[in-house]
Image (cartoon, grey):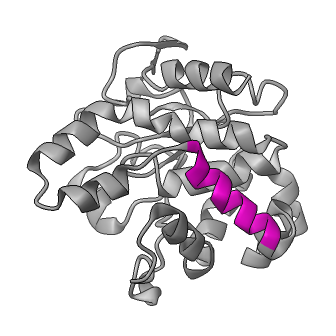
Amino acid sequence: MAVAVAVAVAVHAWASWQGGRMTPSSTLTNLREVGGPGFQADHRRTVYRSNTEPGTSASDYPAGVAVVDLRRDDEVQRVPHPLAHTPGYRGVPMFDPSSGLESAAEAVVLEDQYIDWLERHRVGIADALRTVAAAPGDVLVCCSAGKDRTGIVSALLARHWGADLGRVGEDYAASATGLAERFAAERAVSTDPVGTARAQRCVPEIMTTVIAHVEQRWGSVEAYLRWTGLTDDEVDAL
């Protein structure tokens, strides 16, 4: 079952939205439904996840979708989002500038970085999820690659909705396919190939380790969401 989900999600990751259906052509190679195709079929709306790339246009996205952009202000200025001027766009930087650091110096591997983010950037995570909860219809959560910050928010959502750890991990790992060309280009010009390879790791165990930590530390994803400051109504609205 996990393999089937991985294949379906990976194929979906190469699609874009054209004329009301997903078609295989876009620079939005990491665009997909959170949790994989069909996982949200019984939900009141669909939450998508994606990368953000130059050269895209509004037609690459589902019509009328609200956007929760997790990128820093400098990233947004460098690559403006095509939907930035629509009513549903919200810039919600996940990284808390008051922390002074994106992650602790000792957090080298991605699992440790993500776990560090859960507390260090809890305000940004809460703001992002609060914005998702407030959206009346379909929502797109995005960052630069659609893997790390978007991966954290997506994993919390999927687990909160009842996804098993296998599905959460495979949804995260699908970004390895969606970002293959981007990653290859980054490696080609990297002056730190070891560090680049470490940052590009994208296997299920990374995110399953993070969610397992959440459930060990707080008891459940829902308890973590409340710890970040989300109200009962906001958690219910997710």
Residue 148 location in percent, x, y? 47, 55
Q: Nearer the viewer, residue 36 or 60?
A: 36
Residue 31 location in percent, x, y? 47, 32
**Residue in the image at 30% along x and 52% along y:** 197
On whether residue 211 falls in the magenta region, the answer is: yes
| Left or right: 102, with 187 as reference point | right
* Residue 141 in view of the camera: yes
Q: Nearer the viewer, residue 211 or 17?
A: 211
Residue 17 location in percent, x, y? 47, 20
Q: Which image quarter is the N terminus in?
A: top right
Q: Main secondary structure of the magenta part?
A: helix
Residue 195 in which image quadrant: bottom left
Residue 35 location in percent, x, y? 67, 35
On whether residue 84 falls in the magenta region, the answer is: no
**Residue in the image at 65% along x and 58% along y:** 209
Q: How many marks?
A: 0
* Residue 226 in view of the camera: no
**Residue in the image at 63% along x and 43% along y:** 169
Q: Nearer the viewer, residue 203 or 15?
A: 203
Height in image: 231 above or below 27? Answer: below
Q: Which residues are magenta?
A: 204-216
Residue 119 in which image quadrant: bottom right
| Left or right: 195, with 107 as reference point | left
Q: Nearer the viewer, residue 7 or 17?
A: 7
**Residue in the image at 74% along x and 33% along y:** 45
Height in image: 209 above or below 42? Answer: below
